[in-house]
Amino acid sequence: MAAPPRGRLVRTHLLVALFGMGSWAAVNGVWVELPVVVKDLPEGWSLPAYLSVLVALGNLGLLVVSLWRRLAPGTGEQGPIRAVQGLSVVGAALLAALWHRVAPVAGEPHAVAFLTLAFVLSMACCASNVTFLPFLSHLPPSFLRSFFLGQGLSALLPCVLALAQGVGRLECPPVPINGTPGPPINFPERFSASTFFGLLTALLAISAAAFHGLLRLLPSPPSVPTGGPGRVGAEEKEEEASPLQEPLGQAAGPTARPDPKAQPLFTVQNACLLGLLAVNNALTNGVLPAVQSFSSLPYGRLAYHLAVVLGSSANPLACFLAMAVLCRSLAGLCGLSLLGMLFGAYLMSLAVLSPCPPLVGSSTGVALVVLSWVLCSSVFSYVKVAASSMLHGGGPSALLAAGVAIQVGSLAGAVAMFPPTSVYHVFHSGRDCVDLCSL
């Protein structure tokens, strides 16, 4: 059978990447916009602590998906995926209109609308890992890397929008003769938070449209074959009509379709890979994000935003690297994870010493903290892609286990960091335009 045009394969990879973009774009967008909305919401700089807890509680989305599968077995992944995407689009659209609404709770004003919608978006994002990944098991392994590239874009694009918005611009007035400085000067953003959330809604809608476009390239909804003599001829016709069957099988080699019997899920290697995914995501989605402001803000707003944006851009770049050079050695992935943990330990030490970490006020300190965030994000992103690609051979159950490991690790990291950041106040923040280190 003749291979189809290369343009069809490129289009399919693009659709998979756009599909993956919608997995965590909503929560990433809310996180990136925090420096803009905190000055208008009553929670102030404690808002990130609230959001960390809500994102952790968003793992209830896993239970909802599990209940769905129990009550409607054999319905496939399309229904849950459509529900997740619809919830994300509607939630982001409501956030654009209602994020600034405040209501009294126990006599104190709170950003009820913002926090409620953030929780809804968190549930949708958490559920995406256990609905999107199993769907990809019906495609050749090369598309899994395109999906993780899209997940990287879900972090990068909101950061690009935030930079274009001019988030966090601040100027310190000159110190007068009496030594009492005036209040910091906050310059308005180039566009409002409502516009930002509206653009985020458009990104999520594009991701949902990409999923429907991807379904049009498939011969039929992915399902478990029922077998039977009459099914053989139908499968042959589907294979001839499908743009994904023959050519992508040729491109991916003889391992295009997973063989659960050849690669069972419960092996020592798979257990180690799932453990790596859980630990890496506990660090990258729970522990380190909780202290990013404490490790970066002492060096200035510029250092903080460079750490966020360049660290996020390192995610898709690591996916590009995995598409070209994929490490399939478990020992190699463990070594890379240890390297990422070294960078994480340095960042954690900076957060503990906040607001007066080493080299504060120097360009060397800025360069070191930004470079550490970039390298830490790059290493862990590469390990996540490589470990998930190695698990692909186990079929839908292995990728489902990968999604669960990612979410359980993220939940454990977020819950572990809540007491030191919000209860015991181990980490201390500085004050704008006030030099606490020279006191």
Image: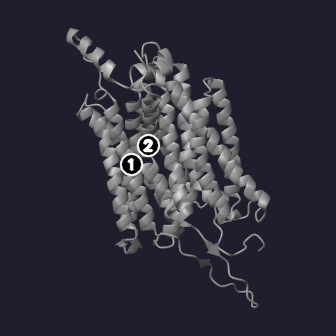
Quadrant holding the N terminus: top left
The residue sitting at 45% across, 45% down in the picture is 21
The residue sitting at 55% across, 29% down in the picture is 387
- Which element carries disc 1, helix, strand or loop? helix
The residue sitting at 30% across, 26% down in the picture is 219
Asked whether the residues under the numbered discs 1 and 2 touch, taking CB atoms below 8 Å apart as contact, a structural biologist would say: yes
Please indicate whether residue 19 sits to the left or right of residue 387 in the image: left
Tell me: residue 97, above or below residue 418.
below
Tell me: residue 222, above or below residue 181.
above
User: Which numbered disc flags the more N-terminal residue, 1 or 2?
Assistant: 2
- Which element carries disc 2, helix, strand or loop? helix
Is 218 or 227 nearer to us in this picture? 218
Residue 257 is at least partly visible in this image: no
Tell me: residue 125, above or below residue 16.
below
Q: What is the spatial separation of the Cα atoms under label 1 and label 2, in whole angstroms?
A: 7 Å
- Residue farthest along the top direction in this orientation: 229
Please state the horizontal and vertical placement of residue 335, each as a whole percent of the image: 68, 31
Is 425 or 409 nearer to us in this picture? 409
Please state the horizontal and vertical placement of residue 313, each as a whole percent of the image: 59, 48
Q: Crowding at label 1, few (<14), some or many (≥20) Cα neighbours within 10 Å?
A: some
* Amino acid type, mark 1: Ile
Q: Which residue is mark 1?
A: 206
Q: Which mark is residue 18?
A: 2
Please state the horizontal and vertical placement of residue 413, each as a whole percent of the image: 53, 46
Please indicate whether residue 406 sits to the left or right of residue 134 in the image: right
Please indicate whether residue 420 sits to the left or right of residue 18 in the image: right
Please state the horizontal and vertical placement of residue 368, each as a whole percent of the image: 74, 53
Quadrant holding the C terminus: bottom right
- Residue farthest along the bottom direction in this orientation: 178
Q: Crowding at label 2, few (<14), some or many (≥20) Cα neighbours within 10 Å?
A: many
The answer to which quarter of the image holds residue 70 is: top left
* Amino acid type, mark 2: Leu
